[in-house]
């Protein structure tokens, strides 16, 4: 029961985090939520450079984080849902998937920041998504494999 409560809170806060960086693109400019926009923008500024040219734009308003960070957070959320709904008994993730996704991610960062002048939002989103999806599931499977949630205290 305690583990389900922890999983629920993780899922709930992940949904809040994703809603926080995207909601201002979907609500009208006259909405009362706009009053908290500077505070929300500042909180996401701690984890992302927030350059508008590197962010997805919906309804004329940019997300509060760049496309790569959007991919990282959405990939983590989807990866967590995948773990909860699908993968528990059917899949196992090994370090090869994480390594491949990490190499793609690093190559994309290097190419976009040092070799090309045009930023590719779609590529940044996809590489961020793949990296976080596989990294999160690998971490979860390692924690599960090592019986982290079922540890018992031994008397010494």
Image (cartoon, rainbow, N blue to C red):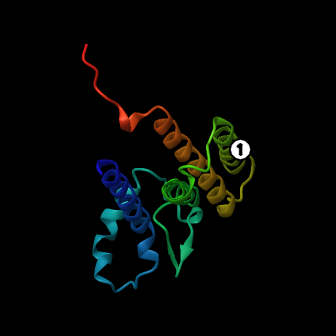
Which residue reaches farthest top?
156
Residue 57: x percent and y percent?
A: 55, 73
Side (left or right) of 95 relative to 61: right
Residue 19: x percent and y percent?
A: 41, 68
Q: In this view of the protein, which residue sits in the foreground, 39 or 19?
A: 19
Residue 48: x percent and y percent?
A: 47, 53
Q: Residue, x 34% and y 70% (percent of image)? A: 37
Q: Is residue 35 above or below residue 114?
A: below
Side (left or right) of 23 relative to 51: left
Q: In this view of the protein, which residue sits in the foreground, 61 or 122?
A: 122
Q: Is residue 74 above or below residue 106?
A: below
Identify residue for label 1. Answer: 107
Residue 134: x percent and y percent?
A: 60, 47
Helix, strand or loop status at disc 1: helix
Q: In this view of the protein, which residue sits in the foreground, 6 or 91?
A: 91
Q: Residue, x 63% and y 52% (percent of image)? A: 130
């Amino acid at each position: 029961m305690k583990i389900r409560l922890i999983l629920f809170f993780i899922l709930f806060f992940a949904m809040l985090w994703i809603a926080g960086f995207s909601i201002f693109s979907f609500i009208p400019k006259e909405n009362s939520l706009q009053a908290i926009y500077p505070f929300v923008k500042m909180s996401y500024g701690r984890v992302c450079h927030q350059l508008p040219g590197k962010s997805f734009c919906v309804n004329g308003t940019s997300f509060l984080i760049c496309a790569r960070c959007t991919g990282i957070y959405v990939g983590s959320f989807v990866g967590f849902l995948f773990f909860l709904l699908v993968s528990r008994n059917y899949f196992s993730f090994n370090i090869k998937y994480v390594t491949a996704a990490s190499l793609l991610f690093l190559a994309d960062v290097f190419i976009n920041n040092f070799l090309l002048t045009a930023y590719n939002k779609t590529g940044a989103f996809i590489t961020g998504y793949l990296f976080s999806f596989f990294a999160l599931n690998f971490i979860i499977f390692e924690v599960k494999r090592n019986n982290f949630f079922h540890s018992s205290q031994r008397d010494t």
